[in-house]
Image: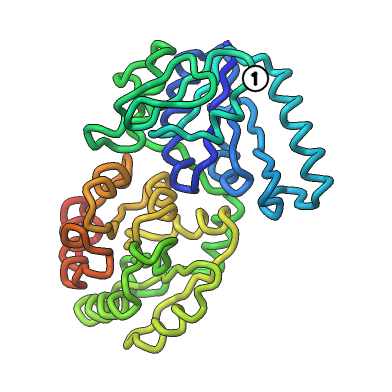
Amino acid sequence: MNILVIRLGLLGDMVCTTPLLEAIKKHFPTGRLCLLSNEYNRPVVARNPFIDKIYTYIHTKDRQRNPRPGFFASLIDAWRLKRDLKRERFDWVVVCNGGFNKPSVRIAQGLGGKIISATREDGSYEYRVDFPISGLLEPVEHEIVRTFRLLAPLGIGLDELPQHLTLSAIPDRVTAMQTAFPRSPGKRLRLGVHISASEPSRQWPISAFAQLINAIAVEHPDVAFLVFYGHGQTANRQALADALQTPVTFVPPGDIDDLMASLTLCDLLVCNDGGVLHLAAGLGVPIVGLFEGNPMKTGCWYPWGVAYTSVSAPDGMPVSAIPPNDVLRAIRLLSDQEGIKSL
């Protein structure tokens, strides 16, 4: 049995694909499991023990995203990728998306084997799909559950769904982060706070983060703060620093491996909905996640397999509508429930 999984989404999408990969490999332990991934997401699965081979997708338009971004290099690499995938002679190709993903289904054409893909909400799809799977968007389920339903044609049922993510940081990177950011004497808990978001509707205001950190520092002077921010977010970092009344440690942005290593330093993490939330969940860090007022967000993208509390904005409102006191209560609730050196 030779199976290819295609997952070309964002960082959180790839993290949430790891239970599906584990289930396939455990169901077919002597089979070969390959993954087609974006270069950006490769660190998420680079050490995954259930994958036999990772292929990197080559962009023919957004060439700057390729390992070799030049025009001719991209053309050559795209040709080599198609050649190598065809040589695998796959028995099955699983297009891992909760809805119909036209680019991924197009890639699956000509690779051989039976193609499994979700359809659009109305049941439609394009190209050859041997097993079109409808109805994945209703009812509201976690993205992991609804994509796992794609495995039914392989004879894999929901009873085989792992209740955890598979993710690991590079040990040497973790050691380097522990050295760079040692625990401060007298601080019994390190609270991570990630202040960046990929979309404006997911961004909690910097003033709200400052209010939260200042309030915790007054009530609990034995809590240390690790503040994470994304590339190009220097202005937000400075705005937060100016608004704080307590010292914090800022963790500068690096690559994905650096981010995973630094997240392991946290006893608990507060963050906006996004890829960092899922990375932290995969690393076993308890999470307070901030979500828009949208049932699809809280119902489909909550942290999987880890202690967490979700805080949602009022219905239809962006994350910026969440009051800081609601987040503070969520932190207390989670720490009390999990015995995380209670706040």
In this rendered view, identify the residue nearer to me: 286 or 315: 315
Name which residue type carries label 1.
Leu
**Residue pictured at 41% horizontal, 84% vertical:** 239
From this viewpoint, is residue 18 visible? Answer: no
Colouring scheme, one of rainbow, by chain, secondary structure, one colour = rainbow
Q: Is residue 167 above or below residue 107?
A: below
Q: Quadrant of the C terminus?
A: bottom left
In this rendered view, identify the residue nearer to me: 193 or 110: 110
Q: Describe residue 218's horizontal placement relative to residue 115 as left or right.
A: left
Question: In the rendering, at what x and y percent does residue 230 appear?
Answer: 50, 67
Q: Describe residue 88's horizontal placement relative to residue 310 as left or right.
A: right
Question: In the rendering, at what x and y percent does residue 31 appear?
Answer: 57, 13
Q: Describe residue 182's horizontal placement relative to residue 273 as left or right.
A: right
Quadrant in the rendering for residue 194: bottom left
Q: Residues within 10 Å of mark 1 (few under 14, many from 20)?
A: many
Question: In the rendering, at what x and y percent does residue 278 appear?
Answer: 40, 48
**Residue pictured at 28% horizontal, 76% vertical:** 208
In this rendered view, identify the residue nearer to me: 173 or 196: 196
